[in-house]
Amino acid sequence: MAEIVTIGELLVDVMAETIGQSFAEPGRYLGPYPSGAPAIFADQAALLGIPTALIATIGEDDFGTMGLRRLRRDGVETRAIRRVPDATTGIAFVTYAPDGSRRFIFHMKDAAPGRLLESDLDPTLFAGCRYFHIMGSSLFSAAMIRTIRRGMEIAARAGAGLSFDPNIREPLLGQPGVAEAIREIAGRADILMPSEADLAFLCPGATTEAAIETLLGGGTKRIFLKLGAAGSLYADRARRIATPAFRVVEVDPTGAGDCTGATFLAGLLRDLPLAELLRRANAAGALAVAARGPMEGNSDAARLDAFMARADSSPVPADGTPDPPEPSPGA
C-alpha cells in the first residue's frame, strides 16, 4: 500500500562534463544516469521509508532497465511502470551555465514517457494513498495532461491530498496547454512546492510574500518554497518559517529540489515537528547537490542523520511562535 503515488517520467540524463559547455558545439557528456523528476522524488521518499509508487512508461531497452533497477533497489513500488516494446526510454540532455542555470533538450513526448495512458492508472494503487504528487515537468503533452487529470480524480476519490511541484522547464512551456495546466493544478494543490522561478511564473510581478498570500488565499494549505543556496521557506495561513541551507560544495544541482520536496513530504507523513522536517529537507537537498547525477545524492535516514550531526544549520521561525497542530493529509 503506497502512501505516496506519483506519476510521470522515468528517464535518463546525459550531462555536460564542463560548465559553459554548449549543445551547439561538440563536447564530452557523462551518463546515462537514472533520472526524471517524479522518479527522483519517489526514490528519495522510498529511501526514507515511505511506501511510494511511481506510474510511468519506459522502453524495452537498457536505459529503462537501469532506471527500474535503481527504483526497485531503493524500495519504490514499480508495478505501475509499463514497458513499451516499440519506444525508447526518455532522455534529457543537460548543460550548465556559469551562472548556475541549466539548459535541457528533452526526448520524451515521442518516446516511452509520451505513451502513458489513462488505462495505466490502476485505482487499486491508490488504496491508502495519502498524497498524489505531480511534477510540472510531467505535463509535457495534451495526452499526459489528460492522464494526470484523471489520476487527480482517482486520488481525490481515494481521499488523498494533492502535492504539486511546478518544476517549470522552459522548453515545455511552448507545448499547447502546459502553462494552463501548471496554473490549474497549482490552484488545486494542498501542498505546493515551488522554486523562486516557479513562484514568479505563478504570480508574475508579485513579491514573494504577496505571491504566497495569493496562493494561500486561493486554497493552497501549505507552501514549501525552495530557495536553493538560501535554504527554504515554509508558509501556511498561520506562520512563516525560514530555514537556512547547509553549506556544501555544489557539484550538480539536478534533482536537488526533488529530493528536498520528497523529504519535506516524508516528514509531514511521519508527523515530524516542522522545524525538524524542514531541516531534514534542506539536508537532503545539500547531499543531492554534492553528488554528480540526479539520483546519486539521494539519501536514507541514516545518511541524513549523519550529515546533520556534522552541520551547524538550524531553522528560524519567522514569527517566533510554536508549530501549530498538524492537520490530516488532504484536510
Image (cartoon, helix red, strand yellow):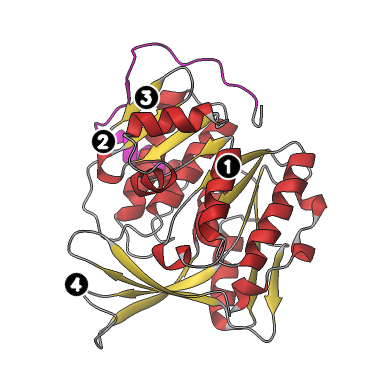
Query: Which residue is labeled 4 in the image?
Result: 20
Q: Residues within 10 Å of mark 3 (few under 14, many from 20)?
A: many
Q: CA distance from mark 2 to mark 1?
A: 29 Å
Q: Residues within 10 Å of mark 2 (few under 14, many from 20)?
A: few
Q: Nearer the viewer, mark 2 or mark 1?
A: 1
Q: Please tell me which of labels 3 and 4 falls first in the chain.
A: 4
Amino acid carrying label 1: it is: Ser
Q: Main secondary structure of the magenta part?
A: loop
Question: Looking at the image, which residue sits at the far right?
Answer: 124
Query: Which residue is labeled 1 in the image?
Result: 163
Q: CA distance from mark 1 to mark 3?
A: 19 Å
- Picture coordinates of residue 129 (x, y %)? 71, 42
Q: CA distance from mark 2 to mark 4?
A: 31 Å
Q: Is residue 57 above or below residue 318?
A: below
Query: Which residue is labeled 2 in the image?
Result: 311
Q: Magenta residues, as a range?
A: 303-328
Q: Please tell me which of labels 3 and 2 falls first in the chain.
A: 3
Q: Nearer the viewer, mark 2 or mark 4?
A: 4
Q: Are marks 2 and 4 in contact (CB under 8 Å)?
A: no
Left/right placement of residue 53 relative to residue 262 reads right
Left/right placement of residue 186 relative to residue 315 reads right
Q: Please tell me which of labels 2 and 4 falls first in the chain.
A: 4
Q: CA distance from mark 3 to mark 2?
A: 19 Å
- Picture coordinates of residue 79 (x, y %)? 73, 62
Q: Please tell me which of labels 2 and 1 falls first in the chain.
A: 1
Quarter assignment of residue 205: top left
